[in-house]
Amino acid sequence: MRQSKLFTKTRKEVSSEEVSLNAQLLLRGGFINKEMAGVYSFLPLGLRVLKKIENIVRKEMCEALGAQEVLMPAIHPLENYKTTGRDKIDVLFHTKLNGGGDLVLGQSHEEIVVPLFQRFVSSYKDLPHGIFQIQAKFRNEPRAKSGILRGREFLMKDLYSFHATEECFDSYYKKSQETYHSIYKKLGIGDCTYFTFASGGTFSKYSHEFQTVSPAGEDEIYLCGECNNAVNKEIIGEVDACPKCGRQKKDLQVKKAIEVGNIFPLGTKFSDAFGLTYKDEKGNDKPVIMGCYGIGISRVMGTVVEVFADKKGIVWPKNIAPYTVHLLSLSAEEETEKIYNSFLKAGVEVLFDDREKSPGEKFAESDLIGAFLRVIVSKKTLESDSVEIKRRNEEKTVLVKKSEIVKYVQEIME
């Protein structure tokens, strides 16, 4: 992609109302545009990041958990929420049909997925199953803040699992924990994201969250250095020690964190509400046991910015950077064009800064945008038939022979 062709531009400043770091940098870098409080457009650079996060999550859902992807509607009949007793949820957006009929915008999808699944299950032979989607969610937050960490419209992956027995559910639930750890590792935040015990509500003693340590976090967690798990501060009064290994509460570290995912048992609450049953081996009707598993796709994007940004701008991990390479030409247009075309031919994702800007401006914008690698072609480097390459998260630069640059980048990305 030629940067001169991007319809978006970087900005030096944003509104003083934007207090969160992720909002400031994503707006300045041209990744998002704020339409109103808690509602953002994702622009070409931002959408590329979102799609990469989506694809990592999607692959793990399908391959590791064997789940099947669907796309359910965002508009829901209010009657379904009355069936489950959730029609009074305070964050629901309400609307009406012109011809009559009360609707809400989906803040989650239990009220849709259970009646949907009910159409296709009748026997224990139809179970287990996992159904997931990646879709916008809507919550009428009283205080939309923290940029894309807490919005009124946001992108989320939600998975619902259906089981005949508790044993089957427990096995799937454990596998989902392993899968989530794999996802966060691939997203680049695995080393700072912790499996966290949280309040279980009406379904079980505990639900479980995945919390990424960051000063921007709204939650506080008690981190156990013994087993690398954590407990949400909201329930720490109920426990005297780490639920996983028993380490005493006084020995746990308090950290601010951002919730980037959660998993929790649903039991038969929604199955009972809609009469979702299956026939067991003896022909008896039994309620289907369910679980729910969420990952905030857009929230992960904001979290990565908060965790890795430096004073110069965004630092994207290699798997989700909008472009692998930011190619800068410093008075060496002809040779840079050749390198650009060689990257394209090899399938390397490259953003080519072909604009008539000063070196200082190009470097500053490159740091702000945060592509994983920066490749600089100049008359000075070409004297040794080389180009300069630098990882965004490192200060050192290396010289690589012009003829070897494509192979060099490909090896880094393996």
Image: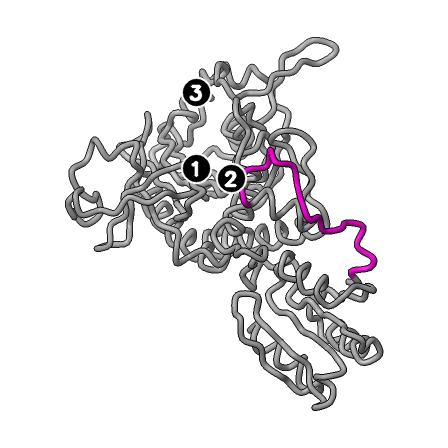
* Mark sitting earlier along the chain (3/2): 2
Q: Nearer the viewer, mark 3 or mark 2?
A: 2
Q: Looking at numbered disc 2 in the image, what kind of residue is underneath it?
A: Asp
* Residue at the limit of the structure toward the bottom, as seen here: 384
- Image point 47% across, 52% down: which residue? 307
Q: Residues within 10 Å of mark 3 (few under 14, many from 20)?
A: some
Q: Main secondary structure of the magenta part?
A: loop
Frontmost residue, 265 versus 326: 326
- Image point 20% across, 31% down: which residue? 238
| Quadrant of the frame with the C terminus | bottom right
Res 158 label: 2
Q: Looking at numbered disc 1 in the image, what kind of residue is underneath it?
A: Cys
* Residue linked to disc 1: 292
- Image point 65% across, 37% down: which residue? 15
Res 273 label: 3
- Mark 1–mark 3 Cα distance, whole angstroms, equals 16 Å
* Mark sitting earlier along the chain (2/1): 2
The picture places residue 43, in percent across and down from the top left corner, at: 71, 46
Q: Are marks 2 and 1 in contact (CB under 8 Å)?
A: yes
Q: Residues within 10 Å of mark 1 (few under 14, many from 20)?
A: many
Residue 357, above or below 330: above
| Quadrant of the frame with the N terminus | bottom right
Res 154 label: none
Q: Are marks 3 and 2 in contact (CB under 8 Å)?
A: no
* Residue at the limit of the structure toward the top, as seen here: 100
* Residue 254 placement: quadrant: top left
Is 230 included in the stretch rendered in magenta?
no
- Image point 28% across, 47% down: which residue? 223
Magenta stretch: give its range: 3-21
- Mark 3–mark 2 Cα distance, whole angstroms, equals 20 Å
* Residue 250 placement: quadrant: top left
Residue 357, above or below 299: below
